[in-house]
Amino acid sequence: MSVIKHLESTKSEYIESFRKFLRQPSISAKGVGIEECARLLKDIMDEWGIDAEVLPTDGNPVVYATVESKKSEKTLLVYSHYDVQPPEPLEEWISQPFEAKTVEGRIIARGAADAKGNIIAFLKAVESYLKTEGEPPVNVKFLFEGEEEIGSPHLPSFVESHRDMLSADGVVCWDGGLHPSGRPSISLGVKGMLYVELRCRGARTDLHSSQAPIIVNPAWRIVWALNTIKPPGGRIAVRGWYDDVRPPTEEELKLLSEIPFEEEILKKELGVKEFLDGVKGLEALKRLVYEPTANIAGMSSGYTGVGSKTVLPCEAMAKIDFRLVVDQDPYRLLKLLRKHLDEGGFRDVEIVELGTLLPSRTPPSAPIAQASMKASEKVYGMKPVVYPNSAGSGPDFVFTKILGLHSVWTGCSPPLAKAHAPNEFNTVEHMVKGVLYAAEIMENFRYL
Amino acid sequence: MSVIKHLESTKSEYIESFRKFLRQPSISAKGVGIEECARLLKDIMDEWGIDAEVLPTDGNPVVYATVESKKSEKTLLVYSHYDVQPPEPLEEWISQPFEAKTVEGRIIARGAADAKGNIIAFLKAVESYLKTEGEPPVNVKFLFEGEEEIGSPHLPSFVESHRDMLSADGVVCWDGGLHPSGRPSISLGVKGMLYVELRCRGARTDLHSSQAPIIVNPAWRIVWALNTIKPPGGRIAVRGWYDDVRPPTEEELKLLSEIPFEEEILKKELGVKEFLDGVKGLEALKRLVYEPTANIAGMSSGYTGVGSKTVLPCEAMAKIDFRLVVDQDPYRLLKLLRKHLDEGGFRDVEIVELGTLLPSRTPPSAPIAQASMKASEKVYGMKPVVYPNSAGSGPDFVFTKILGLHSVWTGCSPPLAKAHAPNEFNTVEHMVKGVLYAAEIMENFRYL
């Protein structure tokens, strides 16, 4: 395969471009280096024959390119992000986070795995086709955003207003890596999110608690309201909350049963003796992947310091992240929650919406899912670990719901690559395998 | 009256001593400035001819003094406290809480009303007698503790082991102020207290909230436990909680009905539209005085900053002050609470006891009660508001139950003086009247 030969003969320039990309900080949470990184990415793409544009959004710019192919009418949309997490705590890095130094075979840098390595590997695959066969196996569109690490706040509106430009036959969200077992990993969906803060106010200021018999205590109000939202037992009691939950298909449950779930290692890692309600094995995994949640992420009221203070608080708040599964709609649920509180006598409890993400799922039978599974098995020599749904959330809905496409989440980062942690790394070997994985996805997608 | 003349001629030094006392922080909840404040108080007393001792307890020291009088065989024990509440929230103060600055005629400081103003006023009364008549109308013993704001944890054992030193014929707990109407206020009893912190732990560290379906969330555990302790409706649901509540006597109810309860002014001041459950008038007052409470004084878990963070907290806590009425016993109730949580499935919720106080009550016919009523009417020109029981708590039982004495709670702080809240204050006028009130109590007690 000429692509492989080309890759082998240009490997050192390839890795040098990767290092150059890593050396440019692009910390979206702090607004550091974003514009510079978008321009650098465009320059690398242009140099490799992939004409790219830096396009404005209501936030950080996206880098966009299309590469046409006469081999196929099919178009693959490749999504990833050039922004990175903040590198802190700095003192724990064995080399500087934006130095991209190689230490014991590892290229150490913030973004090495999440997701600059992924981006460069896919670009290299397309470049290799351009240099050897003149065109890739399918038409390719690249969409690289600069706000993934801060929750993609402007991606939905950008995609909404660029539907035609982004039209395609399938999407690879190229922002992942290998399973801890070394097997490739593919996710076919993500949970959605409704993040709210409940707030309640009482008297004008905190009072002496001797007033408790006659003055409302907002902490009790919040406690009582929370208890009606999710009473002991753990099921969310807001009427209609589960109406739109689509249960897993037989096909999905089969995939789930094939996931290696090392529960004793996980329990030890998290420091718990058992999982919630004593669930084990497949049942635990099923909950993790398919259960909508109401999680108290924070709560606060009154005096929280050491010792005792007899205060009647004038305000109380609780933050809840509700994770949602298909086809729950955060906007509908927000209304149900308001109704629930009103009807339960909690009109005094304010709901402040702090974020929404729609849940999203792609069937295992989708061409892009099949193409990715085949490609990963061929390149890595092992069956992929396929999650019918992730326990986490992400902006997948912009592809499945706004563009109406199938979408998979996968990538070529090393296992346990310390994404979001100090000493994030990649290796030359994984960067090479990544190019082949990207190439095989395109090859397979052409005929599926 | 020579005492008044002396007071007038030394007023500015008097107020300066008060400011000096206020400028010394003495936050028992945080262990800030306690020893320094005890020594400063002793110095002021010594300077005024009242030989004081700083005596150790198992906690913060007490400041003790006796002043003998040949005028009477009677001895009055005067109790108060030199410690203060924490000043938080700091940003709401119009001047620094330990600056004692005068703003629009108000001396603003934490402790200005509760109870440093009281202490200095009574000392000034005795000093005035010493400087003019050579001795006060009765023998006086001063007992100033440094732990009242954290529930007087070591006062009972101190009193227990100093019975002889503290022998007396009656007690004035000099830790109060004027009624909102401007009339003096006298309480013949206090509520007791059981202060606990509920704590619960989950995983080893805070986790990403995608783990919520399988990992226990201690914030939910605390919410659910709280809801079983006091469900909506407000009645404490711990079995046996109300067993020992002694209902008010006819005499007490008569006193209660004479209390001016300016509910509209109170509501406006506190910034509430109505009282809890819409209660009004005598019913509201009866609740305030006779109802045992369970007040959430603080709670905390997870992320409490601005915006959203998807965290599954590893710990949660709630502080509750339970106020008790005669004859509820905090030690028995603590056992009932543990039993309640155990039987309700909350063995994982730890109870940390942070303070106990027994409830206590003195009959209106007691000599010290009669002396205080007469004195207050003479000095302020208005009948006192007599509470058969206070809505607040205090270590009254050490006098009534350990020493077997009658005891009243009164004082000279301004009405609505923001005790325990930002911008606590006193005024020169109230500090002057306070000296006269203290003097008259001694004069009247001599003959009753």
Image (tube, coloured by chain):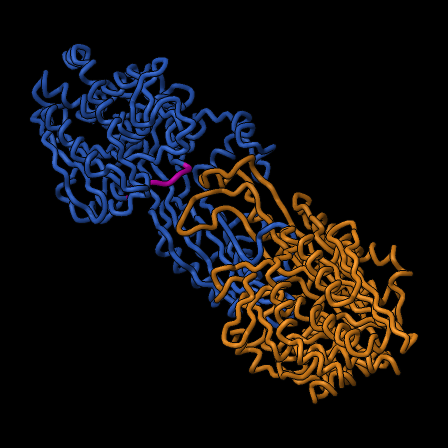
Chain colours: A blue, B orange
Magenta segment main secondary structure: loop
Relative height, residue A26 to residue A19 (above, below): below
Q: Is residue B182 above or below residue B345?
A: below
Any part of residue A377 in sight: no
Q: Quadrant of residue A99?
A: top left
Q: Quadrant of residue A277?
A: top right
Please provide percent x and percent y for residue A59.
23, 47
Q: In this rendering, would A116 be left or right of B242?
A: left
Q: Nearer the viewer, residue A152 or B256?
A: B256
Magenta span covers which residues?
Answer: A391-397
Residue at 33 percent across and 47 percent down: it is A358
Relative depth, front residue between B321 and B31: B31
Residue at the bottom extreme of this rendering: B381
In which quadrant of the rendered image does the N terminus of chain B lie? bottom right
> Is there any visible trace of residue A164 in the rendered image?
yes
Image point (85%, 81%), residue name: B365
Q: Residue at x 17, y 31 (%)?
A: A40
Rendering coords of residue B65 (x, y %): 81, 63
Q: Quadrant of the C terminus of chain B?
A: bottom right
